[in-house]
Image (cartoon, rainbow, N blue to C red):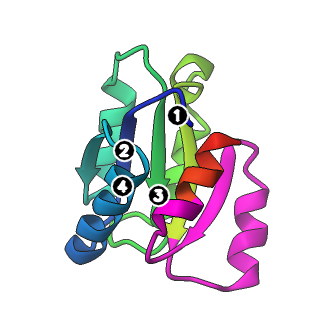
Amino acid sequence: MTETNRFLLVEDDSISSMMTTMAIEAAVPNADVKVINDPVEALDYVRNDDTPDVAVMLLDINMPKMSGWQFLDEFQKLDVATRSRYRIYMLTSSADSKDREKAAKFPFIRGYFLKPLNASDFQKALSN
């Protein structure tokens, strides 16, 4: 099982957020899930997060104001200490192979999940 119970969900859809939170809590019973529905706010949160514990981030691709890709472009510019506190997984409804290929180009992306998040698959991914 993962060594962290901190999770940051960057997701603009409230129903998907609720379902994903339930899946995380089923996979990690003591999970501390923070949901931010605006990627610009999520980036500010990450920049100002001084918690030393590692957090797993689930990042949607298609969001208003800033896409998941734009978020990742900005995330790469952060200092190494900040970036190292987040293990990022893409969480999307896009089954497009081009999105998977694009995600693979970011060295800090740990995985790619299709919505809805399955608790058992998520738990397996976290244990690797």
Q: Is residue 29 above or below residue 47?
A: below
What mark, if any, has residue 26 been given in the picture?
4
User: Left or right: where does residue 8 sit relative to residue 121?
Assistant: left
Can residue 69 be seen?
Answer: no
What mark, if any, has residue 28 been given in the picture?
none
Residue at the image point whose x is 28% and y is 66% from the top? 17
Closer to us: 71 or 29: 29
First-in-chain label (1 vs 4): 4
Discs 3/4, front: 4
First-in-chain label (2 vs 4): 2
Can residue 3 be found in the magenta stretch?
no
Which element carries disc 4, helix, strand or loop?
A: helix
Looking at the picture, how far across and down is residue 26, in whole percent?
36, 55
User: Left or right: where does residue 74 sit relative to residue 124?
Assistant: left
Q: Which residues are magenta?
A: 92-121
Q: Which residue is mark 2?
A: 8
Q: Mark 2 and mark 1: span between their CA atoms?
A: 9 Å
Label 1 crowd bin: few (<14), some (14–19), many (20+), radius 10 Å: many
Q: Which quadrant holds the C terminus?
A: top right
Are the residues tagged 1 and 4 within 8 Å (C-beta)? no
Q: Amino acid at mark 3?
A: Leu
Q: Which residue is mark 1?
A: 86
Closer to us: 91 or 62: 91
Label 4 crowd bin: few (<14), some (14–19), many (20+), radius 10 Å: some
Q: Is residue 54 above or below residue 1?
A: above
Q: Amino acid at mark 2?
A: Leu
First-in-chain label (2 vs 1): 2
Residue at the image point whose x is 35% and y is 17% from the top? 51
Are the residues tagged 2 and 1 within 8 Å (C-beta)? yes
Which element carries disc 3, helix, strand or loop?
A: strand
Closer to us: 41 or 57: 57
Are the residues tagged 2 and 4 within 8 Å (C-beta)? no
